[in-house]
Image (cartoon, rainbow, N blue to C red):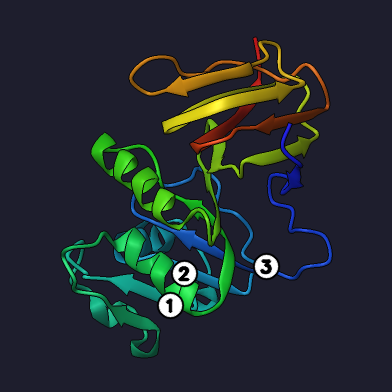
Amino acid sequence: MVKKKSFGILEAEKNKTSLKALLFINGEPPKRLPIASGFDVVACSDGAFLYLRAKGFPLEQLDFISGDFDSFSDLEAIPKEKIILTPNQDETDFHKALTILKEKGIRKVEVYGGSGGEMDHFLGNLSVAYRFWEVMEITFHDEYAQYFFIPKGFKIKGVKGKISSLYPFPMATNIETKGLNWCLNGETLSITDRIGTRNFATEDEVEISYENGAMLLFLGGQYK
């Protein structure tokens, strides 16, 4: 197997400091808002500002609100110094927010509101994350799972019994796994042929490696 690079779910590489951001985007709002402390930057896209305000999020903790502001026109509700107008229609608000965070030196992003609602938005968000995954560790959170692109050599701890779905994007070759109920031994996964969803961890630590392509790991609740 390829030499492993241990990210954990939200764990920074050992002996390396990574600036972290909390980002809200305009998908299905989280039922419970995460605590904003411990992040270097807290931000949202323009549409997400509406549900944050409705849910009583401490808006003073937002470092910036970015987007083309086509989701609402109540700009007076936002302090001018926190508005970053990004009118480019060739990129989504999520893409533009990630670009801003990258320019600020952010390398770890926790994303809420990336799924739910119109599914073309969800698929678009995955495509955007794919374009950044080699330079930023982006983790999506929703009511069912957390999911993220994994490096070609990866291991994670504390996952025994959890749903661990492997989703090629669009394919991943020569996959080796350890600690999953249905292990892979040199197989290829492809979204047009075979995918690896609804697997689960039988060990506390899971190891995954692959040779070419890209792959998402979805970590859900306990397998039933």
Of the 4 image quadrants, the one containing the C terminus is top right
Against 121, is 203 above or below? above
Q: Are marks 1 and 2 in contact (CB under 8 Å)?
A: yes
Q: Which residue is mark 3?
A: 37
Please state which of residues 135 and 42 is positioned toward the viewer in this rendering: 135
The residue that appears at 72% across and 20% down in the rendered structure is 201
Of the 4 image quadrants, the one containing the N terminus is top right
Q: Is residue 185 left or right of residue 203?
A: left
The quarter holding residue 217 reads top right
Residue density around tag 3, few if under 14, some if 14–19, many if 20 or more, within 10 Å: few
Residue density around tag 2, few if under 14, some if 14–19, many if 20 or more, within 10 Å: many
Q: Which mark is residue 141?
A: none
Q: Name the secondary structure under disc 2.
A: strand
Q: Which residue is mark 1?
A: 64
Q: Position of residue 9 (x, y in %)?
A: 69, 44
Q: Which residue is mark 2?
A: 43
The amino acid marked with disc number 2 is: Ala
Q: Name the secondary structure under disc 1.
A: strand
State the separation of the CA atoms marked 1 and 3: 15 Å
The amino acid marked with disc number 3 is: Ser
